[in-house]
Image (cartoon, helix red, strand yellow):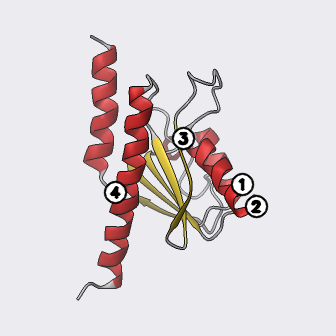
Amino acid sequence: MIDKKDKQQIEDERYMRIALEEAKAASKEGEIPIGAVIVSHGRIIGRGHNMTEALTDVTAHAEMLAITAAANNLGGKYLPDCTLYVTIEPCPMCAGAIGWSQIGRLVYGAPDEKRGCFNHFSPTRTPLHPKTIVKQGVLEDECREIMQSFFRKLRR
């Protein structure tokens, strides 16, 4: 019998794999390979991948695009009953948007030592909503590898 914790882990990995597919799409388009998926009550309501180059917009991060899609899908700007899955730790800008949208749960794959929000803020003073639950390290190796592979190819 699968307990609640194992069921949550299975679900987290399932949606992170979908976020990884978004990251792969970004990579194919020459974008930094970060993908995001927003889930509400077992249904994907928003998804996105980095599009900063295609849109010539520095704010077109995967999380920002997924939040916009989810809000449009639900018809409201607040997402407290939603989980955001993102392959890489959000940057401070995206953390701010996650906070403003009141996303209930943030799940990310690999940390971002250079630009991740948790390196810029203390754990008790992030821009995330106080009720947001954070889980890190879901499919961390796969999430890290897609980023490292992308940058290895760029540096050749």
Q: Are marks 2 and 1 in contact (CB under 8 Å)?
A: yes
What residue is drawn where x is 31% and y is 69%? 10
Q: Which residue is mark 4?
A: 138
Instruction: Using residue 88 as the reference point, say whether residue 59 is left or right of it.
Output: right
Q: Which residue is mark 3?
A: 62
Q: Residues within 10 Å of mark 1 (few under 14, many from 20)?
A: few
Q: Compute the Cα span from label 1 to label 3.
A: 15 Å
Q: Compute the Cα span from label 2 to label 4.
A: 29 Å
Instruction: Using residue 130 as the reference point, say whether residue 49 is left or right of it.
Output: left
What residue is drawn where x is 50% and y is 53%? 37
**Foreground label between 1 and 3:** 1
Give the residue type that dot 1 points to: Asn
Please state the horizontal and vertical placement of residue 134, each as a whole percent of the image.
49, 62
Identify the image quadrant of residue 71.
Answer: bottom right
Q: Residue furthest left?
A: 1
Give the residue type that dot 4 points to: Val
Identify the image quadrant of residue 75.
Answer: bottom right
Q: Compute the Cα span from label 2 to label 1.
A: 5 Å
What residue is drawn where x is 49% and y is 48%? 36
Give the quarter of the figure containing the C terminus. Answer: top left
Q: Residues within 10 Å of mark 4 (few under 14, many from 20)?
A: many
First in sequence: mark 2 or mark 4? 2
Q: Which residue is mark 2?
A: 75
Q: Which residue is mark 1?
A: 72
Height in image: 98 above or below 4? above
Q: Is residue 127 visible?
A: no
**Foreground label between 2 and 4:** 2
**Foreground label between 3 and 4:** 3
Please state the horizontal and vertical placement of residue 72, each as a whole percent of the image.
72, 54
**Foreground label between 4 and 1:** 1
Q: Residues within 10 Å of mark 3 (few under 14, many from 20)?
A: many
Query: Tag 2's secondary structure?
Result: loop
